[in-house]
Amino acid sequence: MSADCLFCKIVEGKIPAKRIFEDELSLCFADINPQAPTHLLIIPKVHIASTAQAEQEHAPLLGHMVAKAAELARGAGLDGGYRIVINTGVDGGQTVDHLHLHLLGGRHMTWPPG
């Protein structure tokens, strides 16, 4: 855990969040600034700053998070499709330095995204 990380504080329960799912590896909660009718964040419980810091040893964890996103999308009825986004670094739009997946759905997504 990182003492000054917003998402680590959410994992520890020091900052409240609308928790949707939690297991020993990951946590899912509602985004506080939703960009779609369904906008969830899925984070690892261990602190990894971004995909730029991900290592081969993190592959099972990252796969778990993507599989969990698909399960959550099915549970949310996103049968028409959804988007999974990982922003990396400032130029990639990352605003919290803790790796996280955005699960967005419930509306038609356009391309390019931004």
Image: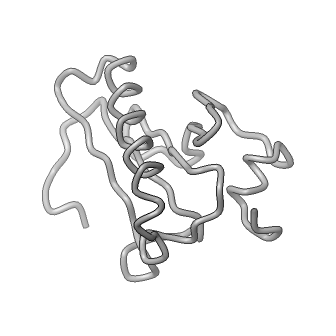
* Residue 84 place in picture, x, y as percent: 31, 47
Q: Relative to 62, does residue 51 appear above or below in the rendering?
A: below
Residue at horizontal 49 percent and vertical 70 percent from the top: 50
| Nearer to me, 45 or 109 | 45
**Residue 27 x, y percent position in the rendering:** 60, 40
Most extreme residue toward the right is 14
Report the side of 18 relative to 52 (left or right). right
Q: Can the viewer see residue 96?
A: no
Instruction: Name the residue nearer the viewer: 87 or 39.
Output: 87
Q: Position of residue 79 (x, y in %)?
A: 21, 21
Residue 110, horizontal then vertical, whole percent:
15, 51
Q: Is residue 84 left or right of residue 15?
A: left
Q: Residue at x 37, y 75 (%)?
A: 92
Given residues 37 and 52, the one toward you in this image is: 52
Q: Of 8 and 104, which appears nearest the observer?
A: 8
Location of the N terminus by quadrant is bottom right
